[in-house]
Image: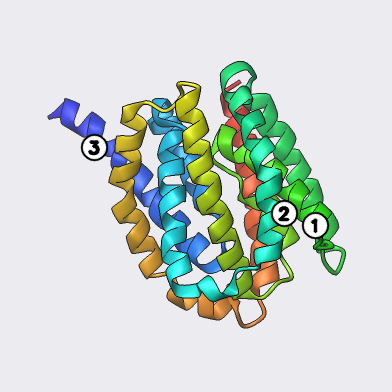
Amino acid sequence: MPDMWSELFPLLAGGVAVFVGAVVQGGVGFGLGLMASPLIAITNPDAMPGAVQVVNATLPLFTLAVEWRGVDWKGLGFAVLGRLPGSVIGAVVVVYVSTRALGVLVGVMVVIAVVLTARAPAVPRNGKTIASAGFLSGITGTATGIGGPPMALVYQSARGTQVRATLAFFFLFGALQSLGILAVVGKLPARALGIGAALIPFMILGFAVSGPLRRRLDGGRLRVAVLTVAAVSACTLIGQSLARW
């Protein structure tokens, strides 16, 4: 019985985190990695970042099934262009570089970006800023499982459907790319895939109950929600990284 509980508890804890993350991402457009990555890293460190990437690749399918018409295809192209080299660098970080230092650095950068953008009307949304956000998201998403804040900050002033649909397509592509790269460099064990698959039902339930949140945020509150989730994400990433030191 103790052995069974030692296996079941990490899965249930991770499932609760994925459920909450799916509710947040279903409403705001990102946040699954923020909620799930730290807890899974603590309870199932050997399954990271692969387990989170499995869920990251599944949730966007549900978002796109509902809101695919809102995708900003031009912006998505720039984002993908930036993410390709970013993911490669993220894989190098996983293999050779300390993810702790990267987490602190990226977290601080996001906090600064949130403070600056909160005092300004919006971040300019153009090819250069979107590609740069995609690049940074590729690094952090592949290395830590938390890649949403850079892209979300660029799209913070867009319509709710456009934010969620564009980020969903970006996250789908990015998660599949990250899984492929992690497999190539030998950092995607079968256990990570199994745990990721076991967390999918929690994700589906979270998305199912996120509908009221979407409608509430689309009433003009999305930008505040994006900045809040980005700030919490950055602080979580910093805390997670410092805890590993």
Q: Residue at x 24, y 31 (%)?
A: 7
Q: Which residue is mark 1?
A: 127
Q: Residue furthest top?
A: 96
Closer-to-camera residue (214/164): 164
Instruction: Please identify the quarter of the rendering in which residue 238 is found.
Output: top right
Q: Amino acid at mark 3?
A: Leu
Where residue 196 appears, x then y in whole percent?
A: 35, 41
Q: Which residue is mark 2?
A: 78
Q: Secondary structure at mark 3?
A: helix
Where residue 119 appears, x then y in whole percent?
A: 86, 63
Q: Is residue 214 above or below residue 228?
A: below
Q: Residue at x 62, y 23 (%)?
A: 92
Q: Residue at x 62, y 57 (%)?
A: 229
Q: Which residue is mark 3?
A: 8
**Label 1: few (<14), some (14–19) or many (≥20) C-alpha neighbours in 10 Å:** some
Q: Position of 173 compared to 198: left or right?
A: right
- Which one is in front in this view, the residue at disc 3 or the one at disc 1? 1
